[in-house]
Image: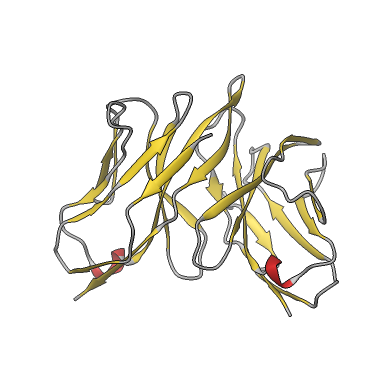
Amino acid sequence: GDSVTQMEGPVTLSEEAFLTINCTYTATGYPSLFWYVQYPGEGLQLLLKATKADDKGSNKGFEATYRKETTSFHLEKGSVQVSDSAVYFCALSDRAGGTSYGKLTFGQGTILTVHP
Amino acid sequence: NAGVMQNPRHLVRRRGQEARLRCSPMKGHSHVYWYRQLPEEGLKFMVYLQKENIIDESGMPKERFSAEFPKEGPSILRIQQVVRGDSAAYFCASSPPGGREQFFGPGTRLTVL
C-alpha cells in the first residue's frame, strides 16, 4: 500500500537559517503530493502541492519538487522565521477510482521550532 | 466562503458513553473525509464519504465506529461505548467532485475519562 516517510524530528533552527525536511513516498499509481502545516491547537492548512513529476510547488517562501526518480518531495525554505514554527506533514493522494481522489496518506510529521 | 466547520471543538465523555462528531463541508464540496490524530502521531485516514454513500471505510475500526453523510445536514462520525484509547483529535476534510486538494476543519478533540 501507499506510505510516506518523513525525516525524524524535532528540528530546531535559528531565524534566517536554511530549512530542509525530507520526505519520500511509496505509491502504486501516480499520486499527487502535498505539504500541510499544523499550528498548535489548529487543523491542517495546505502549504503547497504538486500533481505530476518535476512539478514544483511553492508558497510563502517554501518549495518542494516532485521527484519521481527518487520518489521524494523534500520541503525547503531559504530563510525561516519564528512564525514558521509548527508541525509539517508530507502527504500523498492517489486515485480512488474514476476521476475522484481518495484518502490522504500522511507522514508522521516533523516538529519545527525556530528561535530568534 | 466559510471553511470546513466541525463541532464541538472539544468533547469530554466518560467510558461507555457515545460521542457524536459533526462536520459541515465547504460550500460546493460533496466529498468528506475523516482522520484521527492520536497524541504524538500523524493523521490516519478513517473513512471517505460522498452524499449518502460510503466510498472507502478501510481505516475505520470494525466495531463501535460508524459514519454517515446524509443528503441534508452535516456528516456525523459516531463512536459508541467510548474507551480511553479513543481520546484523540478527529479531523474532517472536504473536497469538491474530482478535486485533489482536501480542506481541513479545526478538529474535534475528544477526551475520554
Q: Nearer the viewer, residue B2 or B87?
A: B87
Judge from the rendering whether residue A12 lies leftward or rightward of residue B17; answer left or right.
left
Q: Nearer the viewer, residue A105 or B10?
A: A105
**Residue A82 rendering spot, x and y as whole percentages:** 25, 70
Question: Can you say whether A11 is above or below B60 in the image?
Answer: below
**Residue B98 rendering spot, x and y as whole percentages:** 58, 27
* Colouring scheme, one of rainbow, by chain, secondary structure, one colour: secondary structure
**Residue B19 rendering spot, x and y as whole percentages:** 79, 65
Residue A48 sits in which quadrant? top left
Q: Which residue is painted at 74% across and 60% down in the image?
A: B21
Residue B106 sits in which quadrant? bottom right
Judge from the rendering whether residue B63 lies leftward or rightward of residue A41; answer left or right.
right
Judge from the rendering whether residue B70 lies leftward or rightward of residue A36; answer left or right.
right
Judge from the rendering whether residue B71 lies leftward or rightward of residue B91; answer left or right.
right
Q: Which residue is painted at 85% across and 71% down in the image?
A: B17
Q: Which residue is painted at 80% across and 78% down in the image?
A: B14
Question: Can you say whether B6 is above or below A4 in the image?
Answer: below
